[in-house]
Amino acid sequence: MISRRGVLRTGSAALVAVGGALALRAGWQMAQLRQARGLYAGGLPAPDGPMNVYHLGHSLVGRDMPAMLAQLAGAGHDYASQLGWGANLRSHFEPDVPVNGFEEENAHSRFLPAQEALAAGDFDALVMTEMVELRDAIKYHDSAKYLANWARLARDARPDVRLYLYETWHNTDDRAGWYDRIDADFDELWLDRVVLPAALDIGAPIYIIPGGQVMASVGRALEDAGGIGNLASRDALMARTPEGALDTIHLGDIGNYLIALTHYATLYQRDPTGLPLALTRADGTAAVAPDANAGALLQKIVWEVVRATPFSGVSA
């Protein structure tokens, strides 16, 4: 018969063993992350000319943002995309996993089937993004694995391709707090759970386009100033529903302009100060533009954030 003291002693030993195993696993994970960070040591030189960029993702990429990026980048820049509704990287990659909204989102002239397009080796850069909610994407859809799969496909066809993950955001009414989520998720999820494990898997760096970081920085600046120019608050970055209500996650014209600036600064490693404010949407219609004061703020913040963000590839 085992005494109560013996049971407690056995239970304590088991807890110590579990704790030791968890500590070993945490140590191994930290070593892996350090190894992955070492892949970025050489830096990323700025491109020496216009780029052909492939965008893979969902509605936080959309049609208008890549079109605005092309206008900001100027002659020679080209692009193609594959999108879906809330699509994750796994659904884009696996032929037997449906991409919701595939027909609707890709009914335009810039669509090219992703696997065929990347296998052709015609793109200088591949920009990917993951679904929202990111925690669910990691838990249920193997985000790091599929980021690595896409990156490997592109590198097999073209070893010098530049690889990026576009960091997005959650709904502005997120219960945990929009700013808090953007702040916490960058290191904990985007980097440590997705980008760095995928980079280690392929043995090459995958850089970050810090969309969420830029959105939060602009939102805070507008709140601190009580609005600037024609931007009263962060809500001015967001779309409106057909009924006129605020869309808490999708971008309006000025939000798309801001994220296009962020892509420009990261991909081309150039200060966006002085770039045009008035652009057109993908369908050729005039987009709502920031005024001069607001535009100067957006351009300034983008360059500050991109240069300060770890693993953007842009040195401060």
Image (cartoon, rainbow, N blue to C red):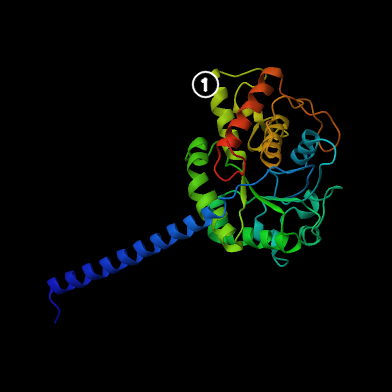
- Please indicate whether residue 305 sits to the left or right of residue 59 in the image: left
- Number of numbered discs on residues: 1
Q: Residues within 10 Å of mark 1 (few under 14, many from 20)?
A: few
Is residue 263 depicted above or below 34 in this figure? above
| Residue 4 place in picture, x, y as percent | 13, 72
Looking at the rendered image, the quarter that the N terminus falls into is: bottom left
Residue that appears at 79% across and 29% down: 287
Q: Quick one: SS at disc 1?
A: helix
Looking at the rendered image, the quarter that the C terminus falls into is: top right
Res 148 → quadrant: bottom right
Q: Which residue is mark 1?
A: 224
| Residue 258 place in picture, x, y as percent | 68, 32
Residue that appears at 55% across and 57% down: 138
Residue 235 in sight from this viewpoint: yes
Toward the viewer: 252 or 202?
Answer: 202
Q: Residue type at mark 1?
A: Asp
Q: Residue furthest bottom?
A: 1
Toward the viewer: 3 or 306?
Answer: 306
Residue 56 in sight from this viewpoint: no
| Residue 73 place in picture, x, y as percent | 78, 36
| Residue 91 place in picture, x, y as percent | 68, 60
Residue that appears at 26% across and 66% down: 16
Is residue 168 depicted above or below 233 in this figure? below
